[in-house]
């Protein structure tokens, strides 16, 4: 257990002493991940945390509205890519675009949305590229 900071010692000096003593004891030797790159080190911290959390963990029940909408938009694009028809693609993208526009108009609490409505025609074109058999229908 770590000792309490003595009165009159600056916090920085006390922390540096704790680190030096831990290093001398070998507490930092052979830690997992030593020598490996830090994931998402070049991504701004909030984005790295969001992306990693969404990728590795289930969504917590009280996710801020902007983050929930980002996840919903990501899921909507995936659903549109796998849709059965162009009509379904347009419905999926249209529905999520409506929510995005509302969030831009009246920003909810939480981190910035950093999301714009999707170009429906572009998503449809990409869908047709993946489903060439649907061109003739």
Image: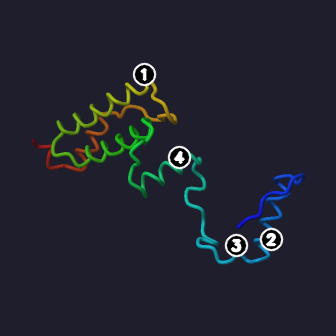
Which residue matches tag 2? 21
Percent x, y of residue 119: 34, 33
Of marks 4 and 2, the one in the foreground? 2
Which of pointers 2 and 3 lies earlier in the amino acid sequence? 2
From the image, state whether disc 3 or disc 1 is nearer to you.
3
Classify 10 Å Cα crowding around label 4: few (below 14), some (14-19), many (20 and above): few
Q: Residue furthest right?
A: 8
Q: Secondary structure at mark 1?
A: helix
Sequence-wise first label, 4 or 1: 4
- The residue to which callout 4 is attached is 47
* Tag in front: 2 or 3: 2
Residue at the spot 30% in from the left edge and 47% down from the top edge: 78
Left or right of 30 in this view: 69: left
Give the vertical position of 114 relative to 5 (above or below). above
State the separation of the CA atoms marked 4 and 2.
34 Å
Residue nearest the viewer, comparing 11 with 119? 11
Disc assigned to residue 105: 1
Q: Which residue appears at 42% of the width and 42% of the height?
A: 62
Measured Cα–Cα span from mark 1 to mark 2: 54 Å
Q: Residues within 10 Å of mark 3 (few under 14, many from 20)?
A: few
């Amino acid at each position: 257990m770590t000792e309490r900071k003595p009165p009159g010692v600056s916090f920085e000096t006390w922390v540096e002493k704790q680190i030096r003593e831990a290093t001398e004891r070998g507490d930092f030797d052979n830690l997992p991940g030593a020598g490996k790159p830090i994931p998402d080190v070049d991504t701004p911290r909030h984005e790295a945390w969001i992306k990693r959390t969404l990728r590795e963990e289930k969504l917590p029940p009280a996710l801020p509205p902007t983050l929930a909408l980002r996840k919903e938009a990501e899921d909507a694009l995936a659903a549109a890519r796998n849709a059965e028809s162009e009509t379904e693609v347009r419905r999926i993208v249209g529905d999520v675009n409506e929510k995005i526009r509302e969030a831009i108009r009246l920003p909810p609490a939480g981190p910035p949305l950093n999301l714009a409505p999707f170009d429906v025609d572009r998503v449809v074109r990409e869908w047709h590229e993946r489903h060439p058999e649907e061109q003739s229908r």
